[in-house]
Image (cartoon, helix red, strand yellow):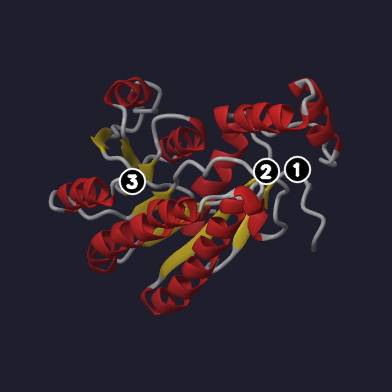
Amino acid sequence: MELSLKGKTAVICGGSQGLGLASARELALLGADCILISRDEKNLLNALQTLDVSQGQQHSFATADSSQPDTVKAAITGITAKQPVNILVNNTGGPAAGPITDADPEAFVKAFSMHVVCNQLLVQAVLPGMKSSGYGRIIQVISTSVKAPIKGLGVSNTTRAAVAGWAKTLSNELAPFGITVNNVLPGSMTTDRLFSLFEANAQRRGVNKSVIEAEWKSEIPMQRFGDPAEFGAAVAFLASPAAAYITGISLPVDGGRIPSL
């Protein structure tokens, strides 16, 4: 099985922490040169120090804020002006939790801009390089909510579904070029995002967050939360040459939690 990404350049959005950084670490272990994008330069510098360089990889970063699409466009344009990008990991933090009936309409506009519009800007910038280099992998970090909406995540459920539809359409258009487009759906992974959801749900229901944690864990057949490295491994596989004939899918990494087939 050919998994090596040596000589390939990967751009990982939200790469300074959480699932973005976990994905970057696994991509680096396969030999990829990783370019991390995030808004916090200090966190980015710290994250770079955790990436493998045993195969001579050259890692770097660029700053951008997904709430400001112009900064995302500037960052990716600067990157592609220097080298083709072979792998793009689209990853943006989820909208605030809450019932959909309580959501301000502006929250939907903001979320759509951060997730769909920024993804579109990034893809349009990297496509020429992928086509010219003969290698392209576009991977979205979304949510299991695209398979089964999650209670209390009204804006997120709506936005994630939009990204999934966008990605499936894109996969069909790019398949003739050998460029794959896939989504990876994290379940309950031990990240700051998960702990913030525990807190938000606990406050909304007036219970201790340990109650929420126990309830969520009980819904997972494996009876545990996932390690971010386990998620990153799935991303890295889909980015590898071994996954050349896999496109247009949404792969759950959730310990079996999704009830659907």
Quarter of the figure with residue 231: top right
Q: Residue 187 carries which label?
A: 2
Question: Is residue 240 among what the camera can see?
Answer: no
Q: Name the residue under label 3.
A: 11
Q: In this view, does 96 lie to the left or right of 101?
A: left
Report, in whole angstroms, how far the alpha carbon at label 1 lies from the one at label 3.
27 Å
Q: Is residue 53 visible?
A: yes
Mark 1, residue position? 255
Instruction: Give the image location of residue 114, x and y in percent.
Output: 39, 51
Label 3: how many Cα within 10 Å (few below 14, some 14–19, many 20+): many
Residue type at mark 1: give it.
Answer: Gly
Name the residue rendered at 66%, 26% in the picture: 199
**Foreground residue among 102 and 141:** 102
What residue is shown at x 23% (from left), y 52% (from top)? 73
Viewer-nearest of labels 1 and 2?
2
Q: Distance between the residues labelled 3 and 2?
A: 23 Å
Which of discs 3 and 2 lies nearer the camera? The answer is 2
Callout 2 amino acid: Gly
CB atoms at circles 1 and 2 under 8 Å apart? yes
